[in-house]
Image (cartoon, helix red, strand yellow):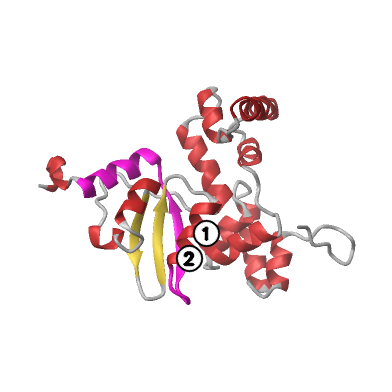
Amino acid sequence: MEIKSKSGGVKTLGQILVEKGIIRQEQLDQALKIKAEQPGKYLGEILFEIGVPQEKINHALYYYNKRKSIGEILVDQKLITREQLEEALSKQKKIQEKWGHTRPLGLLLIEMGYINSRGYLTALSKHFNMPILTMKDYQPNPRLQKVIGERYAMERKIIVLENSAKAIKLVLAEPSTQIMEELQKTVPSGKTIEFYLASYSEIDESLRKVADPFSFTQYR
């Protein structure tokens, strides 16, 4: 869904957010100034950093079709070339036609040797507007994990970092629109969710500490 300005051009994410009352013009001006100084960052990332609710930014990105694809982000960040992206998309299409399922583009690019796991994590972070955290040596709190269900958290690779009266902070290894929508439904009205991102291996190791804490000598 694209919204056009009075001049006939397609409106930017910033213009939409101001018109919908999600941010003030002063906030947009501040974010654009930061973006000029740090061109590698997307506007959504910057707005979240200056205090605009992540949920509102992500809703606008999704509803107004302003979210960049993983492939385009990887090209933007110069992690792959346009030719490599086209090759991977072609391979992804052939897999879909032959096997009836879609292979995630990022994982496909890793298998093809064009990016590493860190590059994929960077693209996911920018795609979903989620800051990257490190979970190395982090031991989740079993009581917090119960907030979303221990089994669900283990299966979906999710760590509950914080649960206050106003917000819950979650770290995901494999974010998707479906998972984010499922989690939104579990949160009481008036409470927000902040999503963060960490590597699959770090989250998996942290979750295994919850399942069997005595198998890790540093926590005995």
Kind of residue indicated by mark 2? Lys
Contact (Cβ within 8 Å) of mark 1 with mark 2: yes
Question: What is the secondary structure assignment of the residue under circle 2?
Answer: helix
Residue 194: percent from the left, percent from the top? 46, 62
Residue 117: percent from the left, percent from the top? 46, 33
Residue 87: percent from the left, percent from the top? 67, 24
Query: Which is more toward the observer, 179 or 162?
Result: 179
Q: Which mark is residue 120?
A: none
Query: How would you rate the neighbour count of disc 1 (Cα within 10 Å): few for under 14, some for 14-19, many for 20 or more?
Result: few
Q: Which residue is mark 1?
A: 181
- Figure check: 4 above or below 217: below
Q: CA distance from mark 1 to mark 2?
A: 6 Å
Q: In the orientation shown, which residue stands out farthest toward the right?
A: 7
Magenta stretch encompasses residue 19: no
Q: Residue at x 73, y 65 (%)?
A: 15
Q: Residue at x 52, y 49 (%)?
A: 176
Q: Which residue is mark 2?
A: 185
Magenta stretch encompasses residue 201: yes
Query: Which is more toward the observer, 113 or 182?
Result: 182
Residue 219: percent from the left, percent from the top? 14, 47
Q: Which residues are magenta?
A: 187-211
Kind of residue indicated by mark 1? Glu
Question: What is the secondary structure assignment of the residue under circle 1?
Answer: helix
